[in-house]
Image (tube, grey):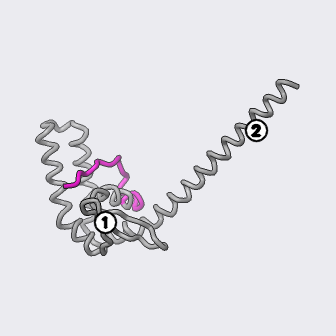
Amino acid sequence: MNQISIPASYEIIYELQRSIFLKNILEPYFEFVRENSEIIIYEKNNGNREKVSRGRLIYFMHCKMPTILERTHDELYSNYRKDNSEEYLLINDIRKHYKVFHLIDNIHKAIDNLKIVFKNYDLEKKETDNNETGSSEEFVDLLSEMNKTKFD
């Protein structure tokens, strides 16, 4: 049985955050990959992965995941036995947020929106990589100028 990692807080009213939430909450069970401008879904099984349809993912989300979330909630409650534990409060948030996927159309939309998330993540990563290089080069140039001024 895979463990659900409790993700950070989300503003679930924003559709792209719903997509990120979907990806993160299902990470122990599924992998979402952007290939040729499409989102491909892989189911994880004992270290292997198998390409699956959206229908398989939807079935899992509607028929299996609610039980997993309920069991996780019950385990956390029995382990902590207090309503103010951080993990218990987070699993309650997750259960509440997960309900946005009660409609199959919402799942399809969240998967489609992952294209936007992945594309922009890749762009931001490139910008960050370029800025770090640029910033370090600018810093070296600045030090060189400072040294010239200092010793002239």
Is residue 88 one of those drawn in magenta?
Answer: no
Q: Amino acid at mark 1?
A: Arg
Q: Quadrant of residue 148?
A: top right
Q: Please give the range of residues in magenta.
A: 1-18
Q: Position of residue 119 (x, y in %)?
A: 51, 63
Element on which disc 1 rests? strand
Q: Say which label, 2 or 1, has the lower sequence index.
A: 1
The residue tagged 1 is 49
Residue 11 within the segment the image draws in magenta: yes
Q: Nearer the viewer, residue 36 or 46?
A: 46
Q: Tell me the amino acid under the disc marked 2.
A: Asp
Q: What is the quadrant of the N terminus in the image?
A: bottom left
SS majority, magenta: loop
**Residue positioned 22% across, 48% down in the render:** 92
Residue 94's label in the rendered image is none
| Residue at the (21%, 42%) spot, across then down | 88
Circle 2 residue: 141
- Direction front: furthest residue: 47
Element under label 2?
A: helix
Which residue is at the front of the view, 151 or 96? 151
